Image (cartoon, helix red, strand yellow):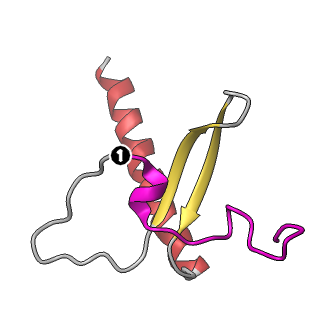
Amino acid sequence: MGNDSGLPSAGEQRVPVDKVLNGLEVHALEPGETAIEAFILLKVLDQDGDVAWSYRTTNRLSREELLGALTVQVDVLRKSLRDEWDDS
């Protein structure tokens, strides 16, 4: 992608994470951990003020590794929601 000027479009330009998250905060890493890659799921307001979902990545993540990590997170969330349902 790009635009008529030959420059990358806004979605293709890489900028520091804090420039994208606009003051949002995340939980700190555990002592001794070092971030090396990230997949960020974003709930955004689009240009019309409508809620939309988007994602961003740091470098090229392995699709297999990303799928595995997301699958585990979905399973953990599903269990947590099921446990909440069972407790009510």
Magenta includes 15?
yes
Q: Quadrant of residue 35?
A: bottom left
State whether residue 53 is above or below residue 75: above
Query: Residue 5 at what x, y percent from top left?
Result: 85, 71
Between 73 and 27, the one nearer to me in the picture? 27
Q: Residue at x 68, y 37 (%)?
A: 46
Query: Residue 6 at what x, y percent from top left?
Result: 83, 77
Q: Quadrant of residue 14?
A: bottom right
Q: Residue at x 45, y 43 (%)?
A: 78
Outermost residue, front side: 5
Outermost residue, right side: 4
Between 86 and 47, the one nearer to me in the picture? 47
Quadrant of image for the N terminus: bottom right
Q: Residue at x 55, y 40 (%)?
A: 43
Q: Residue at x 33, y 33 (%)?
A: 83
Q: Quadrant of residue 8?
A: bottom right
State whether residue 14 is above or below residue 86: below
Question: Which secondary structure type mostly characterizes the magenta part of the structure?
Answer: loop
Q: Which residues are magenta?
A: 1-23
Query: Residue 21 at what x, y percent from top left?
Result: 44, 51
Outermost residue, left side: 31
Q: Secondary structure at mark 1?
A: loop
